[in-house]
Amino acid sequence: MLLARFCPVGALLCGAACAAGSTPDAGAMDTVPSPADDDDDPAPSDDGPSCGDAVAQPGEDCDGPDLGGATCESLGWESGRLTCGDDCRFDLAGCSRCGNGQLDVGEACDGTAFADADDCGDLGLGSSDQALACTENCQLDTGGCGGCGDGVILLPEECEPAAANDEKDNLGGIDCQALGWGGGALACRDDCRFDQSACETCGDHERTGGEACDGADLGGATCADFSAADGEPFDSGELACTETCTLDPAGCMRCGDEAITGTEVCDHLLLGEQTCESLGHTAGTLACSDSCDGYDESACTDCGDGVAEGDEACDGEDLLEETCEGLGFLGGGSLGCAPTCTFDTSNCSDNTCGDGVLQGTDVCDCGDTGSPCTSEQLGDHTCEDIEVQEGGGTYEGGDLACQSPGNCTAFDTSACFYCGDGEVNAGEACDGANLGGETCVSLGHAEGTLKCSSGCEFDESECSDVPNPFRECFTTETDVVDSGLVTTTLTLSAELEIGSLVAELAIDHSYVGDLHVTLRHGDVSVDLLDRVGYPELGIGGCDQPDIDVTLSDAASADAQAACAAMSPAVGGQLRPAEPLAAFAGESSLGPWYLDVRDAYPNDTGTVRRWCLEISW
């Protein structure tokens, strides 16, 4: 509830004192009345099992940010900001009748109607000839009073603006969070009222303060406001808003910018590691469609389909009008096609291909075996001269051979290599899925997934130097104060977003039923042990010694019921008194505190160790 907005009229609004958290008296404050019936509050109802899932279900007015489209105005109020209470009922505290010209509960004025003061002199903030005004939210505007601007907050002032540019506003210790916002920068207006225009609550689906967006409210931004990989604006796709209320262009696209983004499956020469073969063809050159939403398989080939295509010399009876004579067999004969879609010249006569001499229509002739070849037999060609059929460009190295004696019109590139052929060759760290046996760990990282870049270099972007789960401990032995409280502090070395948390405790104490153990971090506090065995086992709870336990929400047994006859009385893996899931989504940054309170005298102990294990 925004307390500064709803102070008692009889007190001329509580100003800074109310904003600091003082509670208005029940007679003056009551609750904010419903326009439909000022006398009847909504009847309480039991929360259903779905309350808190952020989706308004039947029987609920609302659930978290889901207000079902309702607003203060649709419920009959003049203005205001409707929110949802923890019981999934509308919280009308932010709604107002302000603007109807009548004084209602929580209003110090409305238009020209004033409650308990007519001029600045009535408030002790100036003289009687200094007029008061009424703000847009029906609170007193004391900007015309001599007292507003003197640096001292006096009721009904909420704050005092800075006297000079190098000074700060006097906000009386209040910030945006104290007024019910999630964060932002609170300021003081010239009329000594709070300026909440820069306050914000990320996740309320309303873009405020410094938020670039909030939920579906993108502030008019589109994908065209962001640049693609080629420096030009995106021209399609879907702009989104992150959980931290910043714009996320990951779903934006520009086909042809040489980057696969959004729903694109490819972009120009980037094929997402797909080939004709991976799509079920036997060979050929895969391309990307003009719209980047699919592949162009027109240059892929299927040896055995009876149609010679791509780099196939032939296919079945389709010899592309080639003959034995055309291949240099002066005696002619019957040319055939092998199952590999290469020419079968076994029935050609006067076979000069394979004599090791480059002549006639030969492009190469390395003799009867096809290798090794001399530079002369290859026509001074090397692997670097030969174009790679699968993806364009030329081979990067290797040993070029000839398909002789069967075919002297084609080079044998099986021993040539290029980045993208799946083999780790000279000058390459990796190739595609072939990482040469290396992992993130072998490269010095803690864990992660090692990948290979399109340039055949290691891509370590998904390697992590922080292990998951991450574990650190407090190990300084600290005495438990007899019938008192001791607090130890652990500051973790890694900043992580907490997924789940496990706590380990090692405490020597002669009577564990005396101990209350609490873990604190930021605004979250969780009771780990609450006087084990009390009251089930009697007045003092468990009367056995020592704690050496791992506390996890996933444990099947309850720590509160533990009391072993031998030390440790509380041991093994147990479920804490309150769920550790309360820390989920929090940052690990900042100090963690372990409070150990001894409820009764005459028993002593030592905090030996406590550890936190974070899965992130």
Image (cartoon, rainbow, N blue to C red):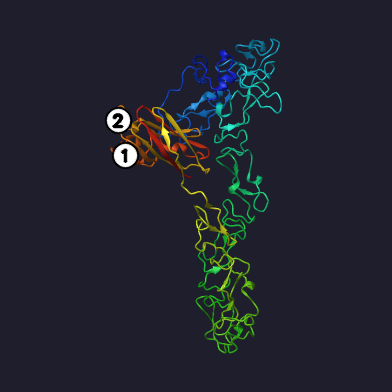
Which residue lies under the disc numbered 2? 536
Q: Which mark is residue 357?
A: none
Left of 169 or right of it: where is 545? left
Q: Nearer the viewer, residue 608 or 369?
A: 608
In the rendering, at what x and y percent does residue 527 appear?
A: 41, 33
Residue 261 in the image: above or below residue 193: below
Q: Earlier in the sequence, mark 1 or mark 2?
A: 2
Near-viewer residue (501 or 612): 612
Label 1 – label 2 distance at C-alpha: 20 Å
Q: Secondary structure at mark 2?
A: loop
Please, what is the three-letter code of the amino acid marked with disc 2? Glu
Of the numbered discs in the image, which one, if any, rests on residue 567? 1
Q: Residue furthest left?
A: 565
Question: Could you tell me the amino acid type at mark 1?
Answer: Ser
Q: Is residue 244 visible?
A: yes
Determine if residue 96 is in view: no
User: Residue 527 vs residue 191: left or right?
Assistant: left
Callout count: 2
